[in-house]
Image (spheres, helix red, strand yellow):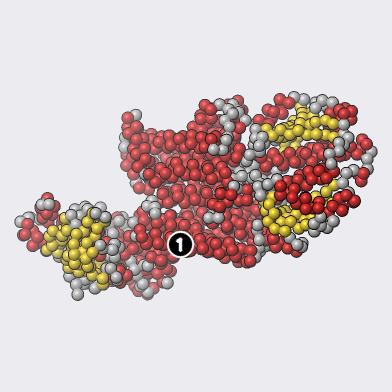
Amino acid sequence: MQPIVTNALTKKFGDFTATNAITFEVKQGEIFGFLGANGAGKTTAMRMLCGLLRPTSGEARVAGYDVYTQADKVKRNIGYMSQRFSLYEDLKVKENIRFYGGIYGLGNEAIREKTRQLLQKLEMEAEADLLVSALPLGWKQKLAFSVAILHDPSIVFLDEPTGGVDPITRRQFWDLIYEAASRGVTVFVTTHYMDEAEYCDRVSIMVDGRIQALDTPRQLKAQFGADSMDDVFLKLARGK
Amino acid sequence: MRQFFVFARKEFYHIFRDKRTLLILFGMPVVQIILFGFAITNEIKNADIAVLDQSRDYYSTRLVQKLTAGGYFRIDRRLQSHRTIEDAFREGRIKMAVVIPPEFGQSFFHLKKAQVQLLADAGDPNTATTLINYASSIIGNYQQELNGQTQLPLTIDTTVTMQYNAALKSVFLFVPGVMTLILLLVSAMMTSITIAREKELGTMEILLVSPLPPPLIVLGKVVPYIVLSFINALMILALGVFLFGMPIRGSMVLLLMECVLFVLTSLSLGILISTVTDKQQTAMMASMMGLLMPTTLLSGFIFPIESMPLPLQWLSNLMPAKWFIIILKDIMLKGAGLEVIWLQTLVLCGMTLLFVAMSIRNFKTRLS
Amino acid sequence: MRTIFFLLQKEFLQIFRNRSMLRIILIIPIVQLVILSNAANYEVKDLSIDVVDHDLSSWSRRLTHKLTASGYFRLNRQTFDREDGFRDLQRDQADIVLVIPPHFERDLVREDKVTLQLLVNAINGSKAGLANAYAGSIIRDFNRNIRTEWLALDERNGPPVIAVTFSNWYNTRLDYKIFMVPGILVVLVTMIGAFLSGMNIVKEKEIGTIEQLNVTPIRKHHFILGKLIPFWIVALFELAFGLLVGKLVFSLPMAGSLWLVFLFAAVYLWVMLGMGLLISTFTETQQQAMFIAWFFVIIFMLMSGLFTPVENMPHWAQVITWFNPIAYFVKVIRMVLLKGSGWADIQFFLLVMLGYALVMNGIAIWNYRKTS
C-alpha cells in the first residue's frame, strides 16, 4: 500500500478548476517535491490530501485511508507544517511541544521523553523556557518541523517550509527532512526554490491545475534537455 | 505636501474598499441613534401595578379608575390579600402595589380621613420615587374632586413654566448624550484600531522609513477619518433634528464648528490610545472597556453629574463627552452663544492639544 | 477529553501570559464596578433655587426659608431681578426659579388669592417633575399653615383628606448603588466572557495557527469547547469576584440564592459565548469582529433596562429587548439579589436563555462547519 495514492482528484471552486484530475502515487520513505507557480493548484491539492478540503471528484487515499470518509484517521497519521508560521508565539518552546503532543494523544510520559529528544536534536535545551516569539526565524521553522513529526506520523506535508530562511538554515532544515525520510517517513513538500527540488527523490510540476511532469530530477532534466531544475520549470511554465 | 496627499488618498482607498467596515461606520450610528433615541427614556408609561382593594365601594373603585386613566399605570393583577403582595413583587412584573383598606368611602366622608397605601418596588429607586409621586398627585386630584370646587380663603396659586422643554420630553435630555457617545466612540475607535492594525501588520514600519516625517504620517491617517467623522456628525445631527425634533435655537455655524472640534478631540484620543497599545485586541478592549462605560456613566449622558459624589464630579471633568453634551444642550435647546459656552469650548481645545502632544511624545519615545 | 484538557491548558497559558490583557480582564472591570456604581444615581438632591422676591414681606421670607429648610432646595441667589433668574437657568446655575410678586402678603390677605410663578429648567424632564412636585407640596404646606394661623382654624374642621402613606420595599433607603451594582456587573462580565472568546478564534485565523489545528485530529467541537470554556470560567470567576466586592464595598443585599445567580450566569454566558463564536465565523480580521461585537454590546447594554427601565420604552423597543440576553440577566440578577426571587420566579427566564444558548451555538457551529 503506497502512502499517498490519488486518482483523477479534482477540486472546483464554482467555474474555476483549481486541480484538474491529478493522478499520482508517492512511495514509502520518499521525499516527494510538489512544484508549481503560484496559483497552479499546489496548495489546493495539498489541502485535499490533508483532509482540509473536500474534493469535488476523484479518489485519494492517504496513509491507506480515504480522504472523503476517513478524514479523521488521515489527520491522525499525518504531520503538517504550513507556510504560515504555525507555533504559538506567546507560548514557550516547551509548552508548544506539550500542546501539540497532547492534542495528538501522546501520554504525559511520552511527551516528556519526546520533548527531551527533540530539544537535544535541535540543540535547543537552553531555549526550552523561552517564548517562541524570542527565537530567530530559522529556529522557529526547525522547531515547527520537529513539532509536526512529534507524533511519528507516516507522512508529513510541508507547505513551502523554508520561505524567508537563510541558506545555512535551509541546509540544516533539509538535513532534518533527510533524517526523517531515512526513518521511513514519507515527505510531501511544496517549494519555490528549484535548488531544493534537486534534493527530492521525485518531483511533480503542476501547471494550471494539471501535473505536467513527474519523475526524478535527473530524468526530468534529461527529458527536457535542461541543465537544472530551474530550466525544466521555466520550459514547462512557458510551454503552456 | 504632494506626498502627504498621496498618503491621505491611500487611506481613503483603504476605507472605501472595505465595504463591511464602511457599512458599520455609517450604519451603526444611524441604527443606534434611532434605537436609543426612542428607547432610552425616563418617561413612565403603563407601569404595571397590583391593586389590593379591600373596601370595593364606589369611591375606591373610582380611585382605581383614576389611577389607570392617565396612561401612567396599568393594572397587572388584582390581589385578594396582603400575603400575596410579596409574591407578586418577586415575580418581577409589577412596580407598585396600591392597597386600599376597608371602608374607604365611609372613612373619607365620616372620619374625614381615608387611607391609601402605596408600596413601591424600590429596587429601582428612581422609578419608585416617580411612581409614588405620580400616584400621590393623582390621588390628590381625586381628593379635590371629591371635595368639590369650593374656593378656600387665602389661596396661593402657582403657575409653572417648564423652560426649554415644555413637554418634558426626555428626548431632549438623552439625544444630545446619544449623539455625543456615538460620535466619540466611533471616532476614537476608528483611529485607534487602524493605527494599531498597521503596527501589527508591520506596514507602519514601511511607512516610517518613507521620507515623510512621522507626524505627517499620522496626520495622513487621520485626515480621512476627520472627514468621515464629520459626515457622521452631520448625520447624527440631522437625525436628532428631523427624527427627534431637537430644535437648533442657537447658531448653526457655531454648532458645526463645535462638532468639528469634538471630532478632533475624539480622533486625537484614538491616536493616543493607539500609541500606548500594540495589538488591535488591546486597542479595542481599551476603547471598549476604558471609554464606553466611563463615558456612559460619567459624562452626564444618563445620570446627572450633580447627583454624583464629589470625587466623581471632579472625575467627570476628564470626560470629553461631558463638555460636548453641555455644548450641544446649550446651543440646541437654550440657544446659547459662545459667550455662554466659551469655557467648555476651551476645555475641549485644551484636551485635543494635550492628547496630540502626548501622542507625539509617545510616538517619539517609541521610535528612539 | 484529554484533547480538551490540552486546549484549555494552552488557552489559560496564553491568557495569563498577556499582561495587558490580564489587566483588562481582571482589574479594570472591578475598578469600574467600584467607581462607576457611585456615578449611576438619579437621586435628585440639592436642587438649586433662585428666589426672585419682589415682596420682601415676612410671609415671603417665611416661604423662602421653608423652601430652603426642606432639605430639597439650596438657595442659589435671592434677587429682585427676574433676568438674574433667567440667566442662572440658562447657565445651569439654578434648576428652579420662584418669582414672588410684589404685595404678595397684602394681596393674599385682601384678595384671598395670589399667584406665584415657578420656572423650572425642564431639559431633564424627570428632574423637573420632581423639582416641581417638591416645590408644589412645600408651597401647599405653607399655604395650609398660614391659612390655619390667619383664620385660627382647627385642622379637623378642614375638608376631608385622603392620607397617602407609602413605603419603599426592598430598598428602604432608596440606595441607588445596590440597584446599579448587579447591572453593571452583568455588563462587565459580558464584555469579558463573551466577546473575548470570539475575538480569540479570529485571532488564530489571522495569524494562521488555525490551519495547523485543522490538520490535527482535534474535533471541531473540541476546538470550540477549548476556546469557549476558558472564557466561561474567567467570566464566572469575575462574577464571583464582582459580587464579593459588591458585598464588601456596597453591602449589596443577597436576598435570594446565589446558586440561582450562578446557574443563570452559567447558561447566560453560553448565549454570549455562542454569539462570539458566531461573529468569529463570518469575520476575517479582529477589527471586523471587534466592531460587530462592540455594536451589539452597546445596543444590548443601553437597551437592557440597566440604566432606564425597559417598561418605559415604546412597545416595539420592548419587543427588541425580548431578544436581548443582557436584559434577561440584568432583570434576573436584580430579582434574585434584591427581592429574593426564587426558582419559580426565574425558571421561565432561564428556559428562554437555555433556548437562546442552544439556538445561538447551533447556528454558530453550523456556520463554523460550513466555512471551514
Q: Residue at x 63, y 66 (%)?
A: C344
Residue B322, image x and y in percent?
58, 38
Q: Nearer the viewer, residue B199 or C94?
A: C94
How many numbered marks are there? 1
Question: Chain for mark 1?
Answer: C
- Residue B13 found in image quarter: top left
Relative vertical location of residue B108 with respect to residue B254 in this rendering, above or below: below
Q: Nearer the viewer, residue B313 or B93?
A: B93
Look at the image and tell me whether residue C364 can be seen.
Answer: yes
Residue C294, image x and y in percent?
48, 49
Q: Nearer the viewer, residue B269 or B288?
A: B288
Look at the image and tell me whether residue B362 can be seen.
Answer: no
Q: Label 1 belongs to which residue?
A: C361
Residue C335, image x and y in percent?
64, 59
Q: Secondary structure at mark 1?
A: helix
Mark 1 belongs to which amino acid? Asn
Q: Nearer the viewer, residue A31 or C263?
A: C263
Crowding around mark 1 (Cα neighbors within 10 Å: few <14, some 14 to 19, many 20+) is: many
Residue B25, image x and y in percent?
44, 42
Q: Residue furthest front?
A: B58
Is residue B89 toward the left or the right of residue A120 in the image?
right
Q: Residue at x 47, y 51 (%)?
A: C293
Is residue B141 toward the left or the right of residue B285 in the image?
right
Is residue C53 toward the left or the right of residue C288 in the image?
right
State the quadrant of the C terminus of chain C. bottom left
Q: Residue at x 40, y 45 (%)?
A: B21
- Residue C365 found in image quarter: bottom left
Q: Residue at x 90, y 51 (%)?
A: B110
